[in-house]
Image (cartoon, rainbow, N blue to C red):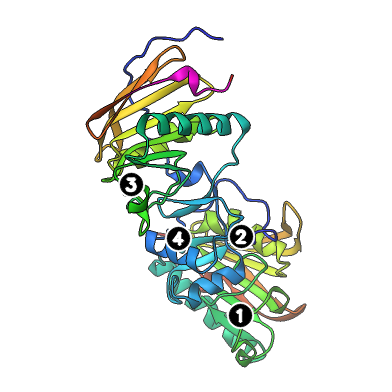
């Protein structure tokens, strides 16, 4: 990214900033504004840099992906750090389970109606994942949202989104000795031992 | 390992500020900013300016702002005649910013800037008229102008009814102006362009009649 000549960022950024629509963001990608060296996503019209993954994050993501393939197989689309398209955002959650097959999303990224589960793995980003990201997913009516909370060694499961208040009506926490029930699109698929996800 | 509580139901966290505070935002270079206009993602009339890589929405201008800018520009034009180019609300191009100051006096004639905006070394005087924008003009734009080594930066401070003249820019990490002189409502503002005294303007003739 060509930001080398920029001066150190004063914090916080000035307001109000230009916000891009999802269409404009896609055009920016096509025009080469976002390169293979960039790790960015569109959050509420702003192009934000994604934090670099630390080792525990990588391990948890890999474990989670393997476990989900075992539970879900190829009946659903399992997408890892791939975009989802919301009204004014195109975030890249750590893991997304969407209805249908992977090839169903050749023409476009999953939207909230197609998404059955969004998972964010949080080590340095717990606060953001519990607040701004949670609000974004709730407002977008993502039906189920998990936070793999690495510092607290627990999985937080949020369900029953409320668009108006941008919150989830239900939160259930699962500790290291628990198993998280996996129920997607009304089908029970088994459960996932929390212990198997966290790096030890 | 810490003792872990059994699964429990808790409330979701309370609302929080907009997402921009949490994340490192993608910033844009001047070239990229021009490109955005070229491809039509930004229209040339859109109320944005590039400030230190951020595409910031400009504040809507209220009547005192517009009138003060016009009064000041008229006075300046009367004094400089056509020895310099006087521009109002037009962009200037800096290293990582493309602001649109209220008034700029640039060297040469308007035709010099047919195919580009003035760059810092061509700018003799830069004016921001501040009412609602005072904070932005002082905290955000002042370091940008100082870093660009813009020789004279004038803030027409409407709320405090004075003109602040900043000179001797110092670049670097904490860019600022070394010198500041304030001219109150009863004082006369000397107009110095390229080191020469061109004339003077009573501050009273620039500022709005009374504060609302």
Specify the subunit that label 4 lies on: A
Q: Vertically, is B77 above or below A140?
A: below
Q: Nearer the viewer, mark 1 or mark 3?
A: 3
Quadrant containing the N terminus of chain B in the rendered view: top right
Residue placed most toward the observer, A37 or B69: A37
* N-term-proximal mark, 4 vs 3: 4
Q: Are marks 1 and 3 on the same chain?
A: no
- Badge 1 sits on which subunit? B
x then y, percent, for residue A111: 31, 49
Q: Which residue is mark 2?
A: B52
Residue B32 vertical position relative to residue B1 in the rendered view, above or below:
below
Dot placed on the residue nearer the N-terminal end, 1 or 2: 2
Pinpoint residue A75: horizontal percent, then vertical percent. Answer: 32, 39
What residue is at 70 percent from the left and 79 percent from the top? B122
Query: How many labels, in total?
Result: 4
Disc 4/disc 3 C-alpha distance (Å)? 36 Å
How far apart marks 4 and 2 lie (CA) works out to: 14 Å
Residue identifier under label 3? A101
The kind of secondary structure element at disc 1 is loop
**Whole-number angstrom distance, CA of label 1 to CA of label 3:** 52 Å
Q: Is residue B24 left or right of residue B196?
A: left
The answer to whether residue A93 is left or right of residue B183 is left
- What span is colored magenta in the figure? A190-199
Same subunit: marks 1 and 2: yes
Q: Are marks 2 and 3 on the same chain?
A: no
Residue bearing mark 1:
B117
Residue that label 4 marks:
A18
Res B16 visible: no
Determine which quarter of the picture holds residue A69: top left
Residue A130 visible in the picture: yes
- Mark 1 surroundings within 10 Å by alpha-carbon count, few (fewer than 14), some (14 through 19), many (20 or more): some
Q: Is residue B24 above or below residue A162?
A: below
């Amino acid at each position: 990214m060509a930001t080398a000549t920029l001066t150190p960022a004063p914090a916080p950024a000035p307001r109000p900033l230009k916000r891009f629509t999802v269409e404009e963001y896609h055009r920016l990608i096509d025009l080469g504004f976002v390169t293979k060296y960039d790790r960015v996503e569109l959050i509420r019209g702003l192009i934000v840099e994604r934090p670099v993954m630390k080792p525990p994050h990588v391990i948890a993501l890999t474990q989670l992906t393997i476990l989900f393939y075992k539970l879900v197989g190829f009946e659903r689309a399992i997408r890892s750090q791939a975009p989802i398209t919301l009204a004014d955002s195109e975030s890249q959650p750590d893991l997304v389970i969407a209805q249908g097959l992977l090839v169903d999303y050749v023409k476009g990224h999953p939207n909230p109606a197609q998404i059955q589960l969004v998972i964010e793995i949080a080590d340095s980003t717990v606060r953001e994942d519990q607040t701004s990201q949670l609000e974004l997913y709730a407002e977008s009516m993502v039906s189920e949202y998990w936070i793999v909370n690495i510092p607290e060694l627990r999985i937080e499961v949020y369900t029953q989104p409320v668009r108006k208040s941008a919150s989830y009506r239900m939160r259930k926490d699962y500790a290291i000795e628990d198993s998280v029930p996996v129920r997607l699109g009304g089908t029970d698929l088994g459960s996932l031992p929390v212990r198997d996800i966290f790096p030890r | 390992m810490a003792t872990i509580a059994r699964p429990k139901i808790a409330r979701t966290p309370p609302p929080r500020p907009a997402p921009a505070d949490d994340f490192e935002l993608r910033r844009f270079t001047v070239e990229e900013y021009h490109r955005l206009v070229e491809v039509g993602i930004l229209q040339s009339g859109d109320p944005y300016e590039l400030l230190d890589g951020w595409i910031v929405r400009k504040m809507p201008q209220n009547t005192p702002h517009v009138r003060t800018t016009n009064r000041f520009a008229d006075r300046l034009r009367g004094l400089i005649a056509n020895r310099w180019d006087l521009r109002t609300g037009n962009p200037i191009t800096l290293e990582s910013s493309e602001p649109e100051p209220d008034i700029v006096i640039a060297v040469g004639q308007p035709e010099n800037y047919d195919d580009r905006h003035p760059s810092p070394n061509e700018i003799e005087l830069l004016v921001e008229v501040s009412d609602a924008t005072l904070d932005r003009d002082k905290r955000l734009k002042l370091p940008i102008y100082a870093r660009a080594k813009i020789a004279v930066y004038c803030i027409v401070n409407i709320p405090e009814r004075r003109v602040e003249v900043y000179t001797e820019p110092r670049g670097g990490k904490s860019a600022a102006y070394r010198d500041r002189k304030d001219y109150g409502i009863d004082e006369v503002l000397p107009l110095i362009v390229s080191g020469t005294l061109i004339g003077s303007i009573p501050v009273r003739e620039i500022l709005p009649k009374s504060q609302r």
